[in-house]
Image (spheres, rainbow, N blue to C red):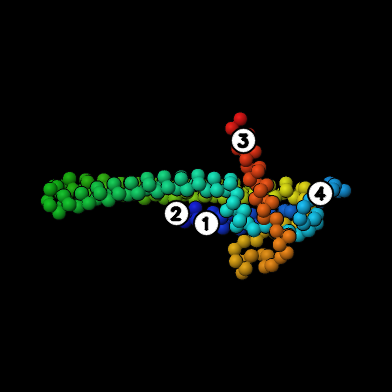
Amino acid sequence: MRKITSIICSTVALSAAIVFASSCNQQTANTAAGETTTVEGPQKGAIVFFNLDRVIAEYDFANDQKAVLETKVQSIEQELTRRGNKLQSDANTFADKVNKGLLTRSVAEQQNAKLQQQQNDFQNYYAQKQQEMGEEQAVTMNQIADAINSFVLKFNEEKQYAMIITTQGDILSAPVVCANPELDITDAIIAGLNAEYVKTKNAETK
């Protein structure tokens, strides 16, 4: 069950990377012609990139959402453990009484049927909670991916880069094998995302 939280970053990275590369050209085309912006680093029309692994790791909103998810998962795991231990304890007690001849046949059959029902209920509950955790993971992934994607589109309205590419992982899986470090806008993306998140949190507290 703990694997659920550990795959968030890679899943978000995959979905977000696909969106970013295809959407930036469209956003640039929609920017008003003739608009000029003074920028530092890569100029308008450049092909730039950012490290999505770093963005996920250093984006405060992503970390907050993952912490919330982890808390929910831990709570569910604790409840599953508690119920599982209770069921095992009841089964052990029943088996001990049967072995010692402390139950009549009819009572033993009734208690055995009750234990079987409890086991079925627990299995159904376990499956329900597994589905619930999967849904929580999907929602968290979508929230993080949507926040990053929305920011990058807005970011590129001003920068007007020809394309923004994401890179992540090792050289075998990264779309950017090598590039001029001046084209790396990771720091700008992280700073902008976190600044926007601070504004959002401040607005929610007012």
Q: Secondary structure at mark 2?
A: loop
Q: Quadrant of the C terminus?
A: top right
Mark in front: 2 vs 4: 4
Separation (CA) of disc 2 from disc 1: 9 Å
Tag 4: amino acid: Thr
Q: Residue furthest bottom?
A: 172
Q: Is residue 74 visible?
A: yes
Q: Earlier in the sequence, mark 1 or mark 3?
A: 1
Q: Secondary structure at mark 3?
A: helix
Instruction: Give the mark, 2 or 1, whose residue is nearer the N terminus.
Output: 2
Q: Earlier in the sequence, mark 3 or mark 2?
A: 2
Tell me what residue is drawn at x 42 percent, y 50 percent: 127
Q: Which residue is mark 2?
A: 2
Residue 72 on image: x %, y %: 46, 45
The N terminus is located in which quarter? bottom left
**Sequence-first tag of 1 and 4:** 1
Alpha carbon of mark 4 to alpha carbon of mark 3: how far? 29 Å
CA gap, disc 1 to disc 4? 39 Å
Q: Which residue is mark 1?
A: 7
Instruction: Please state which amino acid type lies under the numbered disc 3.
Output: Asn
Q: Which amino acid, mark 1?
A: Ile
Q: First in sequence, mark 2 or 4: give its number.
A: 2
Q: Residue at x 60, y 37 (%)?
A: 201
